Image (tube, rainbow, N blue to C red):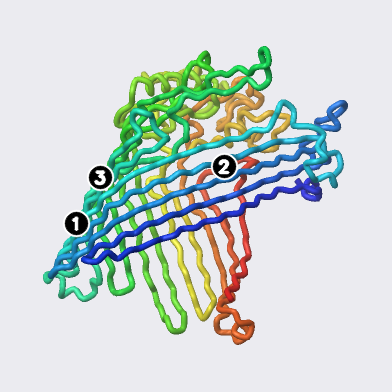
Amino acid sequence: PLYNATLNTSSTNNYTDLTNNTYIEWMAGNGFKVTGRFGFNNTVNGSEQFFPGSHTKFINLTGDNLFLRGSYDKGNGKFSMVSGDLNVNYSKSFGKHILFTNIGANIREDKSESYLYSAVGFPNNKMNSIIFAKQYALNSKPTGDEAINREIGALALVNYSYDNRYFADFSLRTSASSQFGSENRWGSFWAAGAGWNLHHERFLSHLVFVNQLKLRGSVGYTGSQNFNSYQAMLLYNYFLDNSYQGMLGTYLNGLSNPELKWQQKLDYNIGVDASLFNNLSLRVDLYRSITTNLLTDITTPPSLGFSSYKANLGQIENTGVEFRANYRMFVNTGKRQSLNVFVSGISNKNRIMKISNSLKSLTSNQDKLSQTSNKPLVRFEEGQSLDAIWAVPSRGIDPATGKEIFVKKDGSFTETWSSDDKVVAGINQPKLSGNFGANFEYMGLSVGFIATYRMGGQIYNQTLVDKVENAQLNYNVDSRAYYDSWKKPGDNVLFKSIGTVRNPTLATSRFVQDLNEWQVASVNLGYDFYRHEFVRKMKLQRLQVLLNANDVLRMSTVKIERGTSYPFARYFSFTIMANY
């Protein structure tokens, strides 16, 4: 890595974004207002990555392949979006009553396309332009992707409040999207909510420290659209490498599903908002959500020519509690002095309520694949969590033989791993997670930090499997592969005998570990020169410098790697902001 750092490598990304929204409002009188909006967005981006031929990643290219050293990856893409809204609302106040209604419609289209091609053959470090390439990368050609999404919808909303104490609202929306099957383009969603401002009631008026105390509740449906543009359509691709009598053939690339429906989620929520002593604000939510028509990839036999298709399968339940607290320790607006601290958290559990026969078949296929996989695979089973870690229970390494001892479903011991013995060995979801931090300002100087935490839950330590127990001896640099592995009878160790890579470790509870983690996610330091005379002399409205650092510190009960392609890293940025 140190040698490669001295080379003329490069990795660049760039983009240009243009966004415009135009609004037209007409005050029609008698409480009516008409609002129209037209907007568009256009983004063009590009990326380039260059490695010269002297880079160590090409050290194995010798002989006739010597001139294929060096690589250049170049990509570009563009995105465009056009949308429009039209809303008519009516508001009326009479006595202690306030009524607001709105009806509207929207339409939207977005398009995206991207291209990527790779070239090789850059023997000279100075030949850092793709025009010097010898050829395309071996067995490669330009690739790309494109997508078009269209949506149209209508909505209606009614909101009512009485004496600023009681609130109620109801909304209804119907939308059609090109992402779903031709028989189920439309999806309808409704929501209702109510609230009660207790701090405006007489029976709480004597509690002067209570600035706000609000109870609220809601129930309603929401829909999801973040899916593939052509997931419900029959797709074909061309045989570009072969032709017949001057014509190209096609092959099936995606199975259609005209019955594909919107994924819907029914949300129940009860919450409390409170503000106390003019300094402390609290928010607590209890929720339950049920996702129906869950969109899932269904695997298909290889004979069909593609690996999977989209279908509505299953029902998922999420329950939990979420909270946030903010305390303003002191504030002096005139002198721009303040100190705020905050903390938030969430505890969530999910459960598979229902799965279809197709999803049961998928789980059966996963069990077969797990017989050759060195990591736990996803299984879908009613009553279990989506985040369950399925593995065979292990009693560890037998000190006498150096072999792993597994526990079968009937409680007996065996040295033979079987997918039939898999159980839920852990849940890869924290019991509590969130963040906390502080923001301080004094006469232009600002300091702040955000830290995240995770408590409870488990993780499968794949690092120990890949880099220690199943490590190739001639590539291993981890001392645990020698000192912590079984070598002779009587050794009480965590890992099997060194050199047993031919019998790879399959999913076992031996590598399921409790995960508690704390991370300093962001630290920022800034200074605003608003008090300095030179700012006005330079005719600046504002001059500010900012220093930001991300992923500064991480502490965890599990020692694990994320891989060399996406390692844990610290990021620093320096910004100067000048407004004229």
Residue displayed at 64% across by 33% down: 143
Number of the label disc, if any, that sits on residue 560 = 2
Q: CA distance from mark 2 to mark 1?
A: 50 Å
Residue at disc 1, secondary structure? strand
Task: Please report the residue visible at 51 percent of the width from the left and 33 percent of the height from the top.
Answer: 511
Mark 3–mark 1 Cα distance, whole angstroms, equals 14 Å
**Local crowd size for mark 2, using a 10 Å CA cut-off: few (<14), some (14–19), many (≥20):** few
Q: Quadrant of the C terminus?
A: bottom right
| First in residue order: circle 2 vs circle 3 | 3
Q: Inspect the image, locate mark 3, and give the three-letter code of the amino acid beneath it.
A: Trp
In the figure, 456 relative to 550: above or below?
above
Give residue 83's position: percent from left, percent from top. Answer: 43, 49
Residue 340: x %, y % from top left: 42, 70
Identify residue type, mark 1.
Ala
Q: Quadrant of residue 564?
A: top right
* Image position, residue 271 (x, y; %): 25, 55
Q: Secondary structure at mark 2?
A: loop
184 vs 390, left or right, is left
Q: From what the image shows, is residue 241 above or below residue 511?
A: above
Residue 398 seen in this snapshot: no
Q: Secondary structure at mark 3?
A: strand
Q: Is residue 470 left or right of residue 417?
A: right
* 113 is higher (above) or lower (below) than 15: above
Residue closer to the observer: 105 or 382: 105
Label ID, residue 168: 1
For the residues labelled 2 and 3, the Cα–Cα distance comes to 44 Å
Q: Quadrant of the N terminus?
A: top right
